[in-house]
Image (cartoon, rainbow, N blue to C red):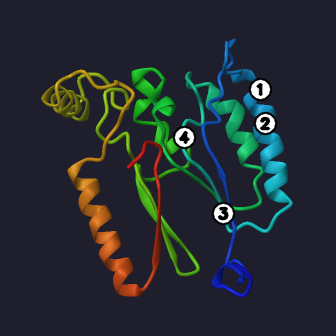
Amino acid sequence: TAGSDVDQAALFSFGAIADCQYCDVEGTRRQYRLSPGKLETCIADFNGQSLSHVVHLGDFIDRDWKSFDVVLPIIAQSKAPVYHVLGNHDFSVEDRYKNQVPKRLGLSKRYYDFKVENWRFLVLDTNDVSLYAHPAGSEKAMASEAIYESLGGDLPKYNGGIGAMQMKWIEKQLIQSEKRGERVVLHSHHPV
């Protein structure tokens, strides 16, 4: 309403993209091959705005390691810093590449934080506990399988979860942000 806090100028603006999901395959309902063009249009639009950052909320690719080679150069044209959230389809690559996905997206950690003005952004890894994001036979894969089975084993296999270490990290970040008087935004691929 006029005269309210809503009318105040924004402290900052950021761009959000979700589920680019590029892959060089025919789609029925989903047109995977159109994703690069749509991403180019999006980045061009964002570059015409004054944005603090851009966040891609996961599923940058649909499948295939080589898909990253097509979309990463496009998003690299962003004038604003880009932050990636890991999505389940980002791990739809051969097992030998699964541990390399975060690095391929420019991430040194699978979950992390950054600050803009007095806002703390927590970027979560909701694939931490999952049946698809870890190489078969790895400790994380076996632990995820055990959790899945303990929940009855009939949940969708594309679901993900947050592990105990990440939960402790989130709690620590929230406590610190509260002490500093920061507002917090959570970015995640799956619903929290």
Residue at (19% x, 28% y) in the render:
142
Disc 1 vs disc 2: Cβ atoms closer than 8 Å? yes
Q: Residues within 10 Å of mark 2 (few under 14, many from 20)?
A: few
Inter-mark Cα distance, 3 to 2: 19 Å
The amino acid sitting under disc 2 is Lys
Inter-mark Cα distance, 1 to 4: 22 Å
Res 104 label: 4
Work out whether mark 4 precedes mark 2 in sequence or the reverse, and give the earlier one. 2
Inter-mark Cα distance, 4 to 3: 19 Å
Disc 4 vs disc 3: Cβ atoms closer than 8 Å? no
Residue at (28% x, 70% y) in the render:
172
The image shows residue 6, relative to residue 165, as above or below, that is below
Relative to 127, is 117 on the left or the right? right
Q: In the rendered picture of this protein, how many numbered marks are placed on residues?
A: 4
The amino acid sitting under disc 1 is Leu
For label 3, the residue is 53
Foreground: disc 3 or disc 2:
2
For label 1, the residue is 34
Check the picture and name the quadrant holding the N terminus.
bottom right
Inter-mark Cα distance, 3 to 1: 24 Å
Relative to 43, is 119 on the left or the right? left
